[in-house]
Amino acid sequence: MPQAVYFLMLPQVLSLDVSGPAETLRLAGTFSLHYIGPEPQITCSIGMTLSRLEPLPARLEDGAILVVPGVSDSARYFANPQAEQARRWLAALQPDLQSRRITLVCVCSGALLAAQAGLLDGYQCTTHHDVLERMRLQAPAALVKENRIFVEDRSVYTSAGITAGIDLALHLINRQCGATRATEVAREMVVYFRRSGDDPQLSPWLRYRNHLHPAVHRAQDVMAAEPEAEWSVPQVAEKAHVSSRHLARLFRSHIGISVREYHEQLRLAVAQQRLQQGYGLEKAALAAGFSSGRQLRRAQQRGQNPL
């Protein structure tokens, strides 16, 4: 019998927080999806009307998974009457959660709503980095973890949100159906790099992007597209349409590291992902563009990012 999954739908729910995990679980073929909420019709974050939502059930069946997605502008929309009704309903589920009769999955700021209902008290959890401090203030008993893609603690799963909801759904499929099925779904979705809960929210692909210089972005795009390639600084500079010396100055000025250091961090991230997929050290190193496992280890020591 398919495992029941319920998505709690509130006004301005983030569409990808719902569709990402829902499509991932659907492709696994072993889950039945249900959409519930205080009202039968809502408007989501992209202006689409979602209708024929089921009412909040008095009780969830044994083994059910409850997904609480985030909403746009959570400070505003978690203060409306529908959110208050959902909070009271969530609070009543606490005994079922503590007995592990049901599983709670929070995506993005959905963790904030669950925390406000007391469901995350005493649990390790995370959420989108923009909401972390608010969750600490509003749920001081929750054990909030920073810079994590997702966190698993007993029957509670929380994620950073948006595409991290897909990573978490793949993790659930791995738990319920095995690694082979999770890998098949990831391939079908063209999710080449499955991230684990220990991966940082702000990977090298995002961490050094908080700048506005177009040449640096062009250089980063080139290396990120093929991190395993043997990029020299002159080659990257040519693609970025600047001189090698100027590119080196730009990298130091705008992101604080050299072109080679940035390239190496991308390679380290790829190697980490390959190791998590079951590759051996040598194979993971070669797939990431390193010449050997020894070179990978040396790079790891330089980056102080243990694999």
Image (cartoon, rainbow, N blue to C red):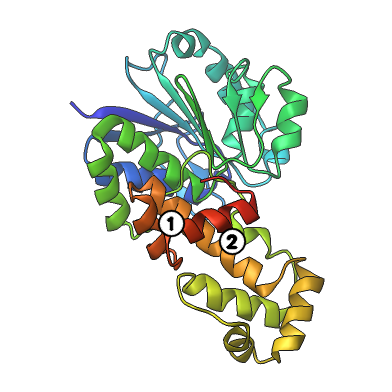
Q: From the viewer's perspective, is 179 left or right of 248?
A: left
Q: Nearer the viewer, residue 206 or 288?
A: 288
| Label whose residue precedes the other's in the sequence (2 or 1) | 2
Count of numbered labels shown in the rendering: 2
**Does any portion of residue 274 appear in the rendered image?**
yes
Q: Residue at x 73, y 67 (%)?
A: 257
Residue 221 in percent (x, y) is at 57, 75
**Does any portion of residue 52 appear in the rendered image?**
no
Query: SS at mark 2?
Result: helix
Q: Nearer the viewer, residue 71 or 227?
A: 227
Residue 156 in percent (x, y) is at 49, 24
Query: Is residue 298 placed above or below 118 in the rendered structure?
Result: below
Mark 1 highlights which residue?
293
Q: Nearer the viewer, residue 84 or 118?
A: 118
| Residue that sits furthest to the left in the current view | 1
Mark 2 highlights which residue?
265
CA–CA distance in space, label 2 to label 1: 15 Å
Q: Residues within 10 Å of mark 1 (few under 14, many from 20)?
A: some
Q: Amino acid at mark 1?
A: Gly
